Amino acid sequence: MDALDTLQQIHPFVSVAIIAFKAVVDFEIRRRENDRTVCLMLAKAFDMMNMLLQLKDTRDPDIVGPRGTIRGRLDGVLDKMKRNVEDCGNAIDEYYKSKFVG
C-alpha cells in the first residue's frame, strides 16, 4: 500500500483507481475478521450445547432436589438461550446477506 500511496502522490490522476482498490482491500480484510468472529460465536454456541449434554443421563427432569426441579431451574435459562441463539443466527444471516461493495 505504501507504493500506491507514493504513486498517488507522484501522479494524482491515478487516485480514483487507487482509492477504489484500497476500499475493496479494506472491505475484504473486515469481512475476513467478521468471518472469524462468526466462527468464534458458533464455537461458543456449540460449547453451550455441549454443556446441555450433561443432562442426557437425567431420566426425570421433574425430580425435586435441594434447589427445586431441574426443569424448573432451567426453564428461564433455556428460554434465554433460545432467544440468544435465534438473535445470533439472525445477525449472522443479515451479515452474510448484506452487500458492502457495488
Image (cartoon, rainbow, N blue to C red):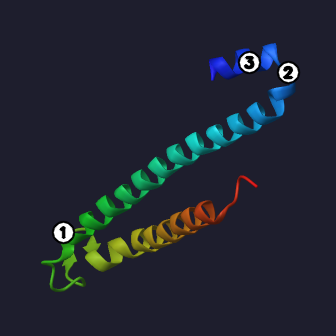
Q: Is residue 18 above or below residue 56?
A: above
Which residue is found at the position 49% from the left and 51% from the top?
Answer: 35
Viewer-proximal residue among 86 and 71: 86
User: Who is closer to the viewer here, 55 or 12?
Assistant: 12
Circle 3 Cα neighbour tier, 10 Å, few/some/many (<14 / 14–19 / ≥20): some
Q: Amino acid at mark 1?
A: Gln
Residue at left offset 64%, top offset 18%: 3
Residue type (three-letter) at the residue carrying disc 3: Leu
Which residue occupies the foreground of this view, 2 or 37? 2
Q: Which residue is mark 2?
A: 12
Q: How many marks?
A: 3
Q: CA distance from mark 2 to mark 3?
A: 8 Å
Q: Secondary structure at mark 2?
A: helix
Residue located farthest toward the left when viewing the structure as drawn: 57
Q: In the displayed image of the protein, which residue is found farthest to the right?
A: 13
- Residue 56 point in image, percent of width and height: 17, 77
What's the mark number on residue 54? 1
In whole angstroms, how far apart are the C-alphas of marks 3 and 1? 61 Å
Identify the image quadrant of the N terminus: top right
Please give the name of the residue rendered at 51% of the width and 43% of the height, measured from the top-left corner: 33
Residue annotated with mark 3: 7
